[in-house]
């Protein structure tokens, strides 16, 4: 039996009947739990149908696009991608674009202008 968490309420009763007639009945809340100390291993999913989605909004949620890459999508559009970055402590976000944090900027008009241009917040020479 394969079940997606988004298909069931925790109080739903799931019944599986094997080809030889053995019937197993469990609560959905028990079927969707990982054993203690183990991670919950869900489907990788796709942008159109994330592995972790919402029952009433199945094209919004989290999916895996590649090894060691997690993505968030909403309405079938990618909103954010998470991947290992060597400079992670020096990375910030402007919208959904990762940018290198500007540090050591002098408090002068020229330095602030240069930092804003480097961040892509304004255009300039």
Image (spheres, helix red, strand yellow):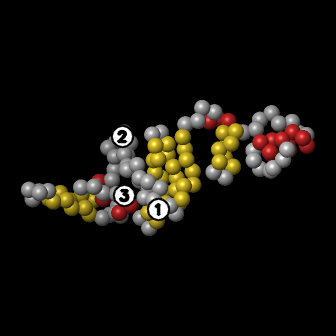
Residue at (57, 54) in percent of width and height: 79
Which mark's residue is nearer the viewer, 3 or 1?
A: 1
Q: CA distance from mark 2 to mark 1?
A: 27 Å
* Label at residue 59: 1
Among the two numbered marks 2 and 1 on one chain, the one whose residue lies closer to the N terminus: 2
In this rendering, would 95 be left or right of 34?
A: right
Q: Residue furthest left?
A: 20
Q: CA distance from mark 3 to mark 1?
A: 14 Å
Q: Which is more toward the observer, 22 or 57? A: 57
Residue 58: x and y, percent?
A: 44, 63
> Please, what secondary structure does the residue beneath circle 2 have?
loop
> Please, what secondary structure does the residue beneath circle 1 have?
strand
In this rendering, would 82 be left or right of 107?
A: left
Q: Please give the residue where the numbered disc 3 appears in the rendered image.
A: 5
* Label at residue 96: none
Q: Please give the residue where the numbered disc 2 appears in the rendered image.
A: 38
Which mark's residue is nearer the viewer, 2 or 1?
A: 1
Marks 3/1 in contact by CB < 8 Å: the verdict is no
Among the two numbered marks 3 and 1 on one chain, the one whose residue lies closer to the N terminus: 3
Which mark's residue is nearer the viewer, 3 or 2?
A: 3
Residue 103: image quadrant is top right
* Residue 97 visible, this angle: yes
How crowded is the residue under tag 2: few (<14 C-alpha within 10 Å), some, or many (20+)? few
Q: Residue furthest bottom?
A: 56
Q: Where, quadrant-wise, is the C terminus in this rendering?
A: top right
How crowded is the residue under tag 3: few (<14 C-alpha within 10 Å), some, or many (20+)? some
Q: Where, quadrant-wise, is the N terminus in this rendering?
A: bottom left
Among the two numbered marks 3 and 2 on one chain, the one whose residue lies closer to the N terminus: 3
Residue at (75, 44) in percent of width and height: 119
């Amino acid at each position: 039996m394969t079940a997606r968490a988004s298909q069931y309420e925790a109080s739903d009763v799931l019944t599986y009947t094997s080809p030889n007639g053995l019937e197993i009945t469990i609560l959905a809340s028990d079927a969707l739990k990982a054993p203690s100390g183990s991670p919950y291993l869900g489907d990788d999913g796709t942008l159109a149908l994330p592995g972790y989605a919402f029952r009433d909004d199945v094209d919004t949620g989290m999916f895996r696009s590649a090894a060691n890459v997690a993505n968030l999508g909403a309405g079938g559009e990618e909103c954010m991608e998470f991947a290992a970055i060597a400079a992670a402590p020096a990375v910030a976000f402007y919208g959904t674009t990762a940018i290198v944090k500007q540090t050591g900027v002098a408090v002068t008009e020229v330095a602030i202008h240069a930092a804003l241009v480097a961040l892509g917040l304004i255009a300039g020479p």
